Image (cartoon, grey):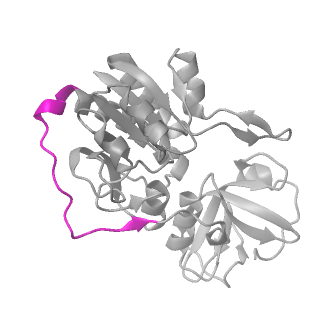
Amino acid sequence: MRVVFMGTPDFSVAALNAVAAAHEVVAVYTQPPRPAGRGQQLRPSPVQARATALGLPVRHPKSLRTPDAQADFAALNADVAVVVAYGLILPQPVLDAPRHGCLNIHASLLPRWRGAAPIHRAIIEGDAETGVCIMQMEAGLDTGPVLLRAATAIGPAETTADLHDRLSTMGAGLIVQALDRLPDLVPQPQPDDGVTYAKKIDKAEARIDWSQPAGQVARLVRGLSPFPGAWCQMGTERLKLLRAVAVDGSGAPGQILPGPGLRIACGAGAVELLEVQREGKRALPAADALRGLTLPDRLE
């Protein structure tokens, strides 16, 4: 089929590879290059970089709301558009232009975790499983009927980075199945029960509150890893926390407990910090990152 691919971050690249290997990608839409790095040089998105390597034509309009942008899209005469973490709202003329409409790869088991940060929220809230849905897009926020879905368990020590990579691979496989079976698939409307919204991650959420139960603290650490990264104060230094698990232990919230490993008391139980990152340093196992330091009695 003639496919328009629309995506921007690393999460979208596996799907681009899979779709390009199976179908004719007539254009790749992605966000415009952004200033990055110390020199603030314009850097193409991961999808643009991969599309260029594959020899695919790339477009990065700032908006799809203008008549010219919509006419350019319609002129591609696409059979279907595949959308995954693109970053722009698709107005109705764009949704209607491809013969089979626009299919979205969404990283949750809809209707749970509609919205911007479904992977983060699933881990933070302690979901036992998540997955990927292939959804027929409509004007509402992730409200369209689902064509295919696949579920996967969330591991007890899994971070957003871990789950992101697994769901990206799952989504790539599932979209190829959907395209191959598209004429025979029956869209299933999402139920009204169980709707939740995965609001965008706010950096203000990232500071650890050690008075919370250990399970909640550990999930926040894993859910915000690697970005923006949960953090606490270690003396005069900000310490970024990247991996943690809930363990037995008790003490005043924030107290560093004696014994093997770096265990911190919480409001109930304790967490063991497995991976951390000091200011200006790279991420390391906690024991390596803090070796030789005189630790304070507590983390704030």
Q: Look at 32% across and 18% down and name the residue there.
A: 22
> Where is 256 relative to 171, above or below?
below
Q: Main secondary structure of the magenta part?
A: loop
Residue 288: where, in percent of width, then height? Answer: 77, 49
* Residue 23, quarter of picture: top left
Q: Look at 61% across and 78% down and name the residue there.
A: 266
Left or right: where 192 falls relative to 8: left
**Can residue 222 be found in the magenta stretch?**
no
**Can residue 195 be found in the magenta stretch?**
yes
Left or right: where 70 falls relative to 257: left
Q: Split into 4 quadrants, where in the image is the C terminus?
A: bottom right
Residue 95: where, in percent of width, then height? Answer: 33, 44
- Nearer-the-camera pick, 251 or 164: 164
Residue 219 visible in this rendered orientation of the protein: yes
**Residue range highlighted in magenta:** 180-198
Residue 137: where, in percent of width, then height? Answer: 30, 48
> Where is 82 relative to 231, above or below?
above
Residue 104 visible in this rendered orientation of the protein: no
> Where is 300 relative to 104, above or below?
below
- Nearer-the-camera pick, 242 or 179: 179
